[in-house]
Image: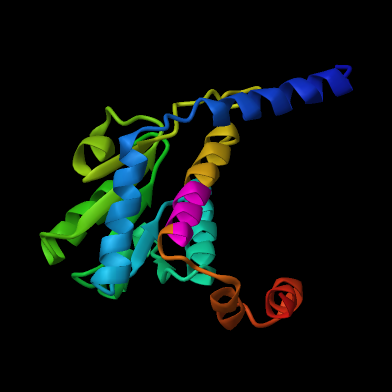
Amino acid sequence: MSQSLEEIRSLVEKEVQAIHNIPVDESILNAIDALYEQIHINKGKIVISGIGKAGQIGQNIATTFCSTGSPAVFLHPSEAQHGDLGVLQPNDILLVISNSGKTEEILKLLELADNLYPKIKTICITGHPENELGRTANICLSTGQPKEICPLDLTPTTSTTVMSVLGDLLVVMLMKKINFDKAGYAKRHHSGYLGQKSRMQ
């Protein structure tokens, strides 16, 4: 099958369009407020969880939060069932990611977390807010249910793009809310090019 630059441009455009289609509504503002309250007022942390590709996105979001003034950890939902749930504290907030909104390990994690701390607050990122995860979480952020650019419509591609963008939105808006500056960044990011750049500035 012949491939062309035009085909590649079309795929890029589909990814861009999916980002444009992310629902920008009050749920995002509610999530930012909830994160701020639990982390910067109640002195908790963000516990982020997902499995597979969504888990990899979650790990990236967690490390980005950490470097920008908001403590976060990644909790593997399967390991949570074998003792790692102990990382959770009552003043924390859970951010869970599942495109389908039906991921068994994530739903079980919410059940276990609620059993440990019944008042724990939860935010979810999902492509299907109508499913169980969206109905269970306190705040549900929808990705807009984008169609994957994978020719099989199976491999997480566009869905993980919009998950990552939603994570970026939460990080950046929380940075603005806490007035996070370059000095704070430099204290948390000592080595490498970015650490050097932040200290110079």
Residue 70 covered by magenta stretch: no
Give residue 92's quadrant in the image. bottom left
Can residue 166 be seen here? yes
Quadrant housing the N terminus? top right
Q: Is residue 107 left or right of residue 21?
A: left
Query: What residue is at 49 percent from the left and 47 percent from the top?
Result: 169
In the rendered image, residue 3, in percent from the top left (x then y), is placed at 87, 20
Quadrant housing the C terminus? bottom right
Can residue 149 be seen here? no
The vertical placement of 65 against 186, above or below, is above
The vertical placement of 6 against 198, above or below, is above
In the rendered image, residue 7, in percent from the top left (x then y), is placed at 80, 19
Q: Is residue 44 left or right of residue 146?
A: left
Give residue 158's quadrant in the image. top right
Query: What residue is at 41 percent from the left and 65 percent from the top?
Result: 178
The one nearer the camera, 9 or 49, is 9
Q: Which residues lie in the magenta part?
A: 167-176
The vertical placement of 18 against 107, above or below, is above
Q: Is residue 99 left or right of residue 138?
A: right
The one nearer the camera, 106 or 30, is 30
In the rendered image, residue 19, in percent from the top left (x then y), is placed at 56, 31
Give residue 145's quadrant in the image. top left
How many labels sit on residues? 0
Q: How is the image coloured?
A: rainbow
Q: What secondary structure is the stretch in magenta mostly built from?
A: helix
Query: What residue is at 48 percent from the left and 43 percent from the top?
Result: 166
In the rendered image, residue 193, in percent from the top left (x then y), is placed at 76, 73
